[in-house]
Image: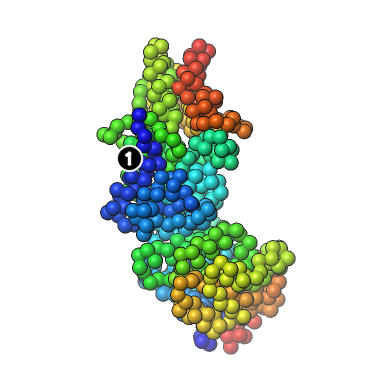
Amino acid sequence: MSHITNRQAICDTLMEAANHDRSIVVTCSDSRGSASLAPFAQAYPEQFIELGIAEQNLVSVSAGLASCGKKVFAASPASFLSTRSYEQVKVDVAYSGTNVTLIGISGGISYGALGMTHHSLQDIAAMACLPDMRVYLPSDRFQTACLIQELLKDEKPAYVRVSRSVTEDVYGEAMDFTLNRAGVLAEGKDAVIITCGELVPYGVKAQKELKKQGYEVGLLDMYCLKPIDEDAVRQAARQADVVITVEEHSLFGGLGSMVAQIVAADSQTKVINIALPDGHLISGNNHEIFHHYGLDDEGMVAAIKKARSEG
Amino acid sequence: MERLKEKAYELRRDIIEEIYHSKAGHVGGDLSVIDILTVLYYQVMNINPENIKDENRDRFLLSKGHCVDALYMVLGDKGFFDKQEAIDTFCAFGSPYIGHPNTDVPGIEINSGSLGHGLSLGVGMALAAKMDEKTYRTYVVLGDGEMAEGSNYEAMMSAAHYKLDNLCATIDLNGLQISGPTKDVMCTSDLGAKFRAFGWNVIDVEDGNDCVELLSAYKQAALVKGQPTAVIAHTVKGKGVSFMENQKGWHHGVLKEEQYQMAMKELKEVLQ
């Protein structure tokens, strides 16, 4: 199993790019360590700006830098970046269309037992409804690196959420990556799982287990939440009897809502959303929490078998 | 210098036209900030329609973006666009001349208007200049009511931390905000002491509607090394129109015809 986290993949990709692109700037809010960006800060001190524990300033300063030609990557815990500085994101990044990529680290329930203050269960919904803001939740280190390489090529705002822990490899070095196109990991007529971020490896396990049990199940890695790959969703939903969305996010306004909206306008296929409940979450590490709420491979298998048995 | 004052009063007449015609805008703050804008745009900053894409141009941010009505008149007067078009279409359906600064209007550096953002944006612009060893300066204008926004203090901290002597904030301290006197709504004074405590150089301008005093402050600010500068400009809300001066009701009041005639007459008399 890989020992490389997605945040480390971001740092590696940015360091490689910064080697020949002096316009790349990384900004942090006392978060260089937790974002795994300390090596960048050390190697490129003149391209690194520390703003201290002040997320509002982090985002607006990043926008100011970007307005002067910098390609800015602002990294801060997703919980704070997507709420404390939300208005700065709305106005100075999205509305002004500045070249700022917001890196929400330790997203979702990554901080586990640290509690609800540190969870970000609203960031997909919050970011996606801002005009011109793109939203990405890459699954593994390879996809993360490809995504950052692509985002370096354009000058538009984006929000990227990554988790704290190591995510099992889904792809390989030579992965086929097209920006804003979902990863079609399997196709199937009995059901399709649509998931994103660090839940994708659970989806891979669930798909394999169901195959053993005789089910033909599709699997979409919808790392691009906005713009979501509508064609991939429609195609998968037309082929399958049931669509199961699984996300490390609130039930409201995330992947499940987006997929249901697309499918409802196109076919009769049933959509079941699995997400985190609307309340205080149980304490534990990420695997324990995923298992408790049915977001892991066992939860996905059970949900699909239940949906199939109910017809 | 008389010419600068004249310009500021000509622009006041333009502002009154714009406000009267559109029945929108924030006339009280426009009239308090217009001398600051005049000195910056006509004497201090190297910003004009020809160099607006030049990386070395100075940067200007109107953090108290609701006074964009005044800024439109300055930019129009300087030839960034047709001033009369801005007067005719301010806040009209489909017009780019909306009630807060936006980049669809030539000369506007970045969108603003939600209070408490401009100083942080200015810190980013000033940091970029330092990184690229460019000599342009960044000027941010804020209101005293706006200084209740906590984000300003994050910006102040970081500007001093990075020794941004290429950043100059001006506080249009007119002492009034929409609900009443700033000292009663939420006392933001002593602003000079606050900036000093955060490590800024502070220049008090006793009469913030006096172009001579303002110009002197900006010249001093440009000489300071290792610190950002805050110009605390003590202004009068509604300055130049007797019945508007120091009246909170004129924060965003709309003029009736007699008031319009009276205001234009008073301003013309100053010019004569």
Task: Identify which residue, A193 or B267, lies in the foreground.
Answer: A193
In-image side of B124 versus B147 (left or right):
left
**In this rendering, is residue B186 above or below B207?**
above
Residue at 62% from the left image edge and 76% from the top image edge: B234
**In this rendering, is residue B99 above or below A206?**
below
Residue at 35% from the left image edge and 65% from the top image edge: B132
Residue at 36% from the left image edge and 53% from the top image edge: A42
Residue B104 makes an appearance in the image: no
Amino acid type, callout 1:
Cys
Residue B122 percent across, percent down from the top left: 48, 64
Q: Quadrant location of residue A23?
A: bottom left
- Label 1 SS: helix
Q: Quadrant location of residue A163?
A: top left
In-image side of B232 versus B136 (left or right):
right
Residue A33 makes an appearance in the image: yes
The residue to which callout 1 is attached is A146
Residue B6 percent across, percent down from the top left: 54, 83
Task: Identify which residue, A84 or B39, lies in the foreground.
Answer: A84
Task: Identify which residue, A52 or B97, lies in the foreground.
Answer: A52
Residue B262 percent across, percent down from the top left: 67, 78
